[in-house]
RNA sequence: GCGCCUGUAGCUCAGUGGAUAGAGCAUCAGCCUCCGGAGCUGAGGGCCAGAGGUUCAAAUCCUCUCAGGCGCACCA
């Protein structure tokens, strides 16, 4: 059982009307145009509007309004339709009966947690890979945004019927982790060995490096022999990964799989297999002592090195094997969530997939633009070179998980995000997180109040639903009815922020309604009907917040 | 220089080719005997960066220009 999106219902009505017109010979037979339904901004333009009249005008050789009239006449005969008007240049404006809307309210109650879900995914496997920060330092605020988007997108895709795997790719091989190990080794020797080796510019300078050195000392005491870089590397990598996992856990995120570059790609031989396969395809050549992949043959703007002159493999080489492996794992779609600073990487990864003969449209890449922090409108400086970047941990500790996640999801991914720390933690209506959560808490409070007055939460069959006759009430019901479409659209466009905006809008309808109308009154029939509405709003708020993985508190 | 992203109200941003471009904040003016005032009501505020084009219809699609951000490694 799943929700029927209301636009689907209306689309069917319109299609049927056009077909009837064709049978009457009122309009010519032929392909139906793509029926586009929109929700007009103004009430006077109806609950739904369609432009098919204008689309058909061209091939009919008649004025759009005339075509629209013919179709409108058919729509008028449909069930649930109260009124149909032709307006403007040729829009057909459709008004639904109040009963139609009131019945949709029952659906919220009968489906509860499942309201808003559907099965367009049909159980197809999708992988969402996100965060994937190198285990060479703590997660920073930018990773947090990627984490929030990835996790929420996974929730949304699950809600529309996909089988979703959340994956974190761990770059635990190569030069970066070597430098981490070497950085720790030198700090260790500085502090405990009395040896001061030079500390190069590109080494990791953050305090966390010294902390890892100290932790090593605490765990293993003072070894008699000098500790190797490799040992420190392994220790540091593990420690960082532990910390990253912890940060993410406190941010409410659990991955299904942690995929190690070192163990699962390199040691297992998958990387060599991939290189050999490319060799067979004759897209590889030697130049200046290095091994190159002719990615330009597949749309990249320059060729790329796979194996450096010193014999080391590049990061890209692992990535080729990694993405090959993803495609071969049977996913219908693979989604990568990358920082916007990696966009230059897209062409070469796509080139790799094409070289193996795969259709690269299976890969979707979402780029997350940078986050800038401010405090009461004043920018917080973030120099990440100096190792003084703002960590995700700091922001979670200050603002809280809910505030962080809601803010990260309040913009589309490819727009810069201005994150105001003071605003995000303010317990006031200008903070959208609180505005929405408060709406939910308020409903809980009303229901509690009703119970205390001895009112039981009514069942569907006991409700005189027609008592919900205020315009505000009908508008709220219409808003609730649009939720399944919002979820669907958000999944298709892979845009979690649509849910965020929806929830804010819903709260912005409920608060004024509450303010103007009493729910619990002496009129028990009306009380029941309004409680029924409140509960539906509560359900949709819970479902929506759950998609964002933001809590729906009962009291605040 | 080349590529990607972004230019919408004072600020932060929504806006799947449609009708008079929206919201929050900020500003100004109002609202508490009553379910949570952590809320509500109202007002002002715009040449959708600019110029061409496609279309019956463009903030939205195409081209160019300007401004900002980010990339352009035998780094990750």
Image (spheres, coloured by chain):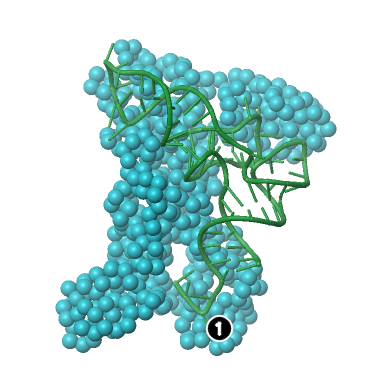
Q: Residue at x 54, y 85 (%)?
A: A290
Q: Give the colour in which the image draws chain B.
A: green
Residue A227 image offset from top left, x and y in percent: 25, 83
Q: Does residue A201 appear in the picture of this structure?
A: yes
**Outermost right residue:** A61
In this figure, which residue is indicated by the disc labeled 1? A291
Near mark 1 (Cα within 10 A), the count class, few <14, some 14-19 or many ≥20, is some
Residue shown at the point (49%, 25%) measured from the top left = A475
Residue A240 locus on image (x, y percent): 31, 67
Residue A90 located left or right of residue A393:
right
Q: Position of residue A113 (x, y in %)?
A: 39, 37
Question: In which quadrant of the rendered view does residue B16 lie?
Answer: top right
Quadrant location of residue A278? bottom right
Horizontal side of A471 relative to A407 (left or right) equals: right
Quarter of the figure that contains the C terminus of chain A = top left
In the displayed structure, would residue A198 be above or below residue A326? below
Front in this rendered view, residue A248 or A462: A248
Q: Chain A's shade in the image?
A: cyan
Residue at image point 55% right, 60% down: A363
Above/below status of A32 relative to A379: above
Q: Is residue A402 left or right of residue A28?
A: left
- Give the percent coordinates (x, y) of residue A502: 47, 37
Q: Tell me which residue sits at (46%, 17%) in the image.
A: A470
In the rendered image, which quarter is residue A460 located in? top left
Between A309 and A457, which is closer to the camera in this rendering? A309
- Secondary structure at badge 1 equals strand
**Chain letter of disc 1?**
A
Is residue A147 visible to the viewer in this orientation of the structure? no
Question: Foreground: A54 or B52?
Answer: B52
Q: Is residue A275 left or right of residue A206?
A: right
């Amino acid at each position: 059982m799943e929700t029927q999106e209301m636009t689907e219902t209306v689309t069917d009505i319109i299609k049927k009307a056009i077909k009837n017109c064709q049978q009457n010979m009122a309009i010519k037979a032929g392909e139906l145009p793509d029926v586009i339904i929109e929700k007009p901004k103004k009430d006077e333009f109806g609950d739904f509007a369609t432009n098919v009249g204008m689309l058909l005008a061209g091939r009919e050789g008649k004025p759009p309004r005339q075509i629209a009239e013919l179709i409108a006449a058919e729509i008028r005969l449909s069930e649930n339709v109260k009124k149909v008007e032709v307006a403007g240049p040729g829009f057909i404006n459709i008004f639904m009966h109040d009963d139609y809307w009131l019945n949709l309210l029952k659906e919220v109650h009968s489906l509860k947690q499942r309201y808003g879900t559907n099965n367009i995914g049909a159980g197809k496997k999708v992988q969402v890979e996100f965060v994937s920060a190198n285990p060479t330092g703590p997660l920073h605020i930018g990773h947090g945004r990627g984490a929030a988007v990835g996790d929420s997108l996974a929730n949304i895709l699950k809600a529309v019927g996909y089988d979703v795997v959340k994956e974190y790719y761990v770059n635990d091989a190569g030069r970066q982790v070597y430098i981490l190990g070497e950085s720790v080794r030198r700090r260790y020797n500085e502090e405990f060995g009395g040896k001061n080796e030079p500390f190069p510019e590109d080494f990791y300078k953050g305090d966390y490096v010294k902390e890892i050195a100290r932790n090593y000392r605490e765990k293993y005491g003072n070894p008699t022999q000098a500790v190797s870089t490799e040992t420190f590397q392994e220790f540091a990598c593990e420690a960082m990964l532990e910390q990253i996992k912890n940060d993410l856990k406190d941010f409410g995120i659990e991955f299904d799989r942690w995929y190690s570059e070192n163990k699962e790609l390199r040691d297992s031989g998958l990387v060599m297999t991939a290189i050999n396969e490319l060799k067979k395809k004759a897209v590889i050549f030697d130049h200046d002592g290095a091994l190159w992949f002719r990615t330009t043959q597949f749309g990249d703007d320059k060729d790329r090195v796979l194996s450096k002159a010193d014999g080391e493999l590049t990061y890209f080489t692992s990535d080729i094997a990694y993405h090959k492996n993803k495609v071969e794992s049977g996913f219908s779609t693979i989604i990568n969530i990358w920082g916007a600073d990696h966009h230059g990487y897209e062409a070469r990864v796509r080139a790799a997939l094409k070289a193996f003969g795969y259709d690269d449209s299976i890969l979707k890449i979402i780029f997350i633009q940078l986050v800038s922090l401010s405090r009461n409108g004043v920018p917080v400086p973030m120099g990440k070179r100096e190792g003084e970047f703002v960590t995700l941990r700091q922001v979670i500790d200050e603002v809280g998980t809910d505030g962080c996640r809601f803010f990260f999801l309040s913009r589309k991914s490819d727009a810069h995000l201005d994150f105001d720390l003071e605003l995000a933690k303010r317990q006031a209506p200008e903070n959208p997180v609180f505005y929405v959560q408060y709406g939910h808490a308020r409903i809980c409070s009303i229901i509690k109040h009703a119970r205390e007055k001895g009112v039981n939460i009514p069942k569907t069959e006991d409700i005189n639903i027609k008592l919900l006759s205020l315009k505000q009430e009908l508008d709220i019901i219409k808003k609730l009815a649009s939720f399944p479409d919002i979820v669907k659209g958000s999944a298709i466009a892979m845009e979690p922020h649509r849910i965020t905006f929806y929830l804010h809008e819903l709260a912005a309808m409920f608060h004024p309604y509450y303010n103007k109308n009493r729910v619990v009154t002496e009129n028990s029939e009306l009380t029941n009907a309004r409680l029924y509405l409140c509960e539906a709003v509560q359900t949709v708020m819970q479902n929506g917040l759950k998609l964002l993985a933001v809590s729906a508190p009962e009291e605040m």
